[in-house]
Image: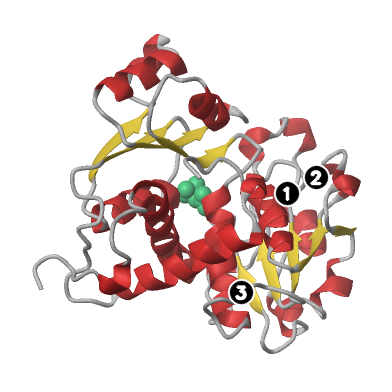
Amino acid sequence: KRHLISAADLTRDDAVLILDTAEEMARVADRPIKKLPTLRGRTVVNLFFEDSTRTRISFEAAAKRLSADVINFSAKGSSVSKGESLKDTALTLEAMGADAVVIRHGDSGAPHRLATSGWIGGSVVNAGDGTHEHPTQALLDAFTMRRHLTDGAGQDLSGRHITIVGDILHSRVARSNVHLLTTLGAEVTLVAPPTLVPIGVERWPCEVSYDLDAVLTKSDAVMMLRVQRERMNAAFFPTEREYARRYGLDGDRMARMPDHAIVMHPGPMNRGMEITAEVADSPRCTAVEQVANGVSIRMAVLYLLLGGNEPAVTTTAPTGT
Ligand code: CP
């Protein structure tokens, strides 16, 4: 495959290959020199039209650990604020020789447009588009679940029960996770207030519940989502107290989860709304681990898209050793 636009495009074998490659990449982080020569001479452009902390920084770290040159482009402070179009921005990047463009955009479909337009010749990786998809987030989430809930390499998530809670309506993370987790054999339940459930959810390959307490006790992983106020009309804001009471995860609720079950959050968190500080800071919460795993997943994705003909990580000595 040349691009990564949607988790829905991945087969089970594609996904397991990415997860297994990410396990190899994770070993690089344990080495004294955390770098591989695999993408030396290649250029990766991070093209961010929306704010990001974790995704932008981890794609940059991933590309640098593979020895690629990295150009970071943020729409804020660029000629986009003068009205320059996605097409002209893309043509400018193409002129600079981008081998891969990692794009985050507020419009659902922008990465697909970039990949199919002919404006650029390199690979396109979707780093989150509108309310559509965030495939590398789903991959790092699956990687984290696989590490906690299975024996690891080569495995999928068959038979695991995953609950995703919160603002499903606006969540590209939820969409990508439903696609990927079900492809990997997991059973997914969405829990949300009725106003934050998307129209047409009955066609998604998952269950929908409005009762968090009923679902918690049979979950292997509970993923809490941020309420995305920036994508909501102010009139539809749920009150913080009422939302937390019905759909937030606090210490009492976490205690009802099975002992082996983990709490996940893609970040950024609204502490006190969807998750209490007690839960966010507990050893059962993998939010920080998910960020570290994101670097390994993004290394794997860039390696598989750009460096497939190079030697595998396990047979490549790190630079300088
Ligand atoms: N999870 C996630 O996409 O975080 P950022 O918006 O900080 O990249």
Q: Residue at x 74, y 55 (%)?
A: 166
Left or right of 290 in this view: 82: left
Which of the two discs, 1 and 2, labels the residue nearer the N terminus?
1
Q: Are marks 1 and 2 in contact (CB under 8 Å)?
A: yes
Evaluate whether residue 233 shows in this view.
yes
Quarter of the picture containing the C terminus is bottom left
In three-dimensional space, the C-alpha distance between marks 2 and 3, rounded to whole angstroms, equals: 23 Å
Evaluate whether residue 278 shows in this view.
no
In three-dimensional space, the C-alpha distance between marks 3 and 1, rounded to whole angstroms, equals: 19 Å
Type of the residue with mark 2 = Leu
Q: Which numbered dot is residue 167?
A: 1
Left or right of 130 in this view: 206: right
Q: Nearer the viewer, residue 131 or 20?
A: 20
- Report crowding for label 3: few under 14, some 14 to 19, many 20 or more residues within 10 A (C-alpha): many
User: Which residue bears the numbered disc 2?
Assistant: 196
- Report crowding for label 2: few under 14, some 14 to 19, many 20 or more residues within 10 A (C-alpha): some
Type of the residue with mark 1 = Asp
User: Which residue bears the numbered disc 3?
Assistant: 279
Q: Quadrant of residue 48?
A: top left
Q: How far across and down, in percent of the image, does residue 43 sit?
A: 26, 39
